[in-house]
Structure formats: C-alpha cells, structure tokens
Image: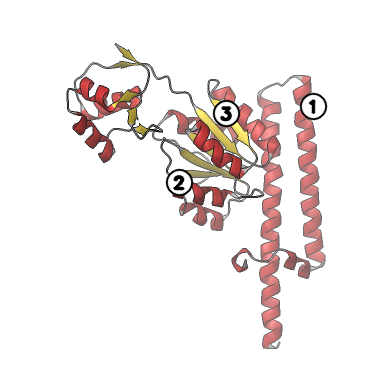
Amino acid sequence: MTYKKPLSVGQVAEICCVSKKTVLNWIYDGALKAFTTYGGHYRVWPVNVKKFLDSTGMDIDFEYVDERITHILIIDDDADYSQMLKSAISTELPSAEITATDDGYEGLMLIGEIKPQLVILDIKMPKIDGFQVLDLLKTRKIDHDMKVLVITGYLDEGTKKQLAGTIADHWMDKLADINGMIKTIVSFVRSDKPVFLNGSNN
Amino acid sequence: MKQQDLDEHSVQVENLKAGIREISHEINNPLGVMRMAAYFLEVTNPPEDKKTHYFKVLNESIDKIEKCLEQLKILRENPSAASVHPPLQDT
C-alpha cells in the first residue's frame, strides 16, 4: 500500500505494530513529527512516518508519496519586491503556492487560513510591523510546521539582536545575492535542516 | 563648553545618528528592489512587456534613493533637522 494522505495515530500504530499510546508518546517526545487538526486530533504526514522509521531503524516496509503542497506566504508592503520574489521562488519551486500580502494583519489571518510552511516577513511595514507580527505569532498556537524567514532592508546589529529574541528562524538582508536567497528559501521548504546562505542565522 | 551645551550637543549627535540610520535603511529597500529587477533582466531574458516593467521598477527605485539622498543633504546642511527622527530607544 502506498500512503499519500496524513495518517491518524491509529494508522501509525498499526503500521508500526505498537499501541496508540506509544505513538502518542513518540509525538509528545518530538521524535515523530505531527500536526493537529481543527478538532484537536494528531495527524502525521507519510514523509514524517518514513523519517521516523529511518531514524529509529525500525525494519518496516513503508511506501509513500509526498503530496504535501508547499505554501509560502510573503508579507511585505513593497509590492514590487514581493511580486519579483514570488516569481523568483516560482522558478525554483514551480508547484509551490505562493501568496503575497502587503498587510501584516492580513498576513496573520492568512497564516491561519493557508497554513504556510514558510512565511517570508518584512520588518518595516505600516499598520503593524514585522516585530509585532512575530510577537503575535509567538502567543498564538501554530498547529502546523512553519518557519519564518525575515527579509528586510533594516538588518543592522540592533535589528539582528532584536530578531534573536523572536520566533524568526533566520534573517537576511534584502541586498543579499538573489541566488543565495532563493537557495535558502528552497531549503526551508524542502528540508528539515535548512541551509543558510547570505546573512546571519540564529 | 558648559554642561548644558554638552548635553544639547550629545542629544543632537544621537539624533543625527538615528536620522542617518533611518535614511540608510530607507535606501536599502529600493536597492533590494533594484537587485531583484536586475536579476530578472539578467537571468530570465524577459519578454518586452516584462522588460519595460523591470525598467520602470528600476527608475522608481532610483527616484526613491534620490529622495533619500536629498534628506541626507538636508541633514548635512542642518544637523538639527535630524530631530524629526528621534532615536528609537527614546520612543
């Protein structure tokens, strides 16, 4: 059987020949990556089951197709910049769904709606700035895997220090080399261990 | 120099630093846009309409940088004008 859709705890338990409680413990320990549904139930993407089986050395045949759609959300008030960034990412990730907004509040709403794997966030924006967005995200329960990459023209030492205290995973200067920037973005959505090119990482 | 003069001078220097910081950041944004537009012109061999768009974006960014440079010129000629950009730590 080839698995494509997210699996329930019961299904994972059956595949691994263990109890549901054991699977839940793997999830609680962080060994098995899962997300929660609106109803509060755990679900596990097949790719994460495979990763878990490989990391633990469990000798179980498990076939899957990774059908996760990559969603990327760009929050930047500079429409020209975000449109070009969107096009640049599309050339490397043609199947990715990329949404752009120039409003931090709308961005917060879209995060709940489209559940992006990656949010690319600007700092200086009207209405609500990037730091405020990061603060609000910190207090919110995000029930899906999501990374936050800050791309800003305001990346001085003070800003970097401030960003280090937020939930941002990485930050880059808007002046960074575009190829390096795109490689970093691609690695964020394709891998659990992103590569950091140009700019500092935390 | 009297203490009061020194204090005023110190506040002015801090305001000037904050003003320069603000303007240099303001320059970075259009530069980032220019880098992106240049990337597309160089790498993607865009059709005519896209090319026109990228050149428009480049020109608009140049205008924004020009405005920032004008602000810098004002600061150079009148450092007290920097007080319109108070240091962030004071806000």
Q: Residue A98 carries which label?
A: 3
Q: Work out which quarter of the rendered image holds the N terminus of chain A and state it.
A: top left
**Disc 2 chain ID:** A
The disc labelled 1 sits on which kind of residue? Thr
User: Comparing marks 1 and 2, which lies closer to the viewer?
Assistant: 2
Q: What element carries label 2?
A: loop
Q: Can residue A196 be seen in this view?
A: no
Q: Can you tell which mark lies on residue B52?
A: 1
Name the residue rendered at 67%, 65% in the picture. B17
Residue B67: horizontal and vertical position, in percent?
A: 80, 51
Task: Depth check: give the residue in front, B14 or A58.
Answer: A58
| Residue placed most toward the observer, A16 or A194 | A16
Q: Quadrant of residue B73?
A: bottom right
Hey, what amino acid is under mark 3? Answer: Ile
| Circle 1 or circle 3, nearest the eye | 3
Helix, strand or loop for disc 3? strand
Give the Cα distance between marks 1 and 2. Answer: 43 Å
| CA distance for labels 1 and 3 | 24 Å
Mark linked to residue A140: 2
The residue carrying pointer 2 sits among few (fewer than 14), some (14 to 19) or many (20 or more) residues within 10 Å by Cα, namely few
Q: Which residue is drawn at 77% across and 52% down?
A: B68
* Subunit that carries the residue with mark 3: A
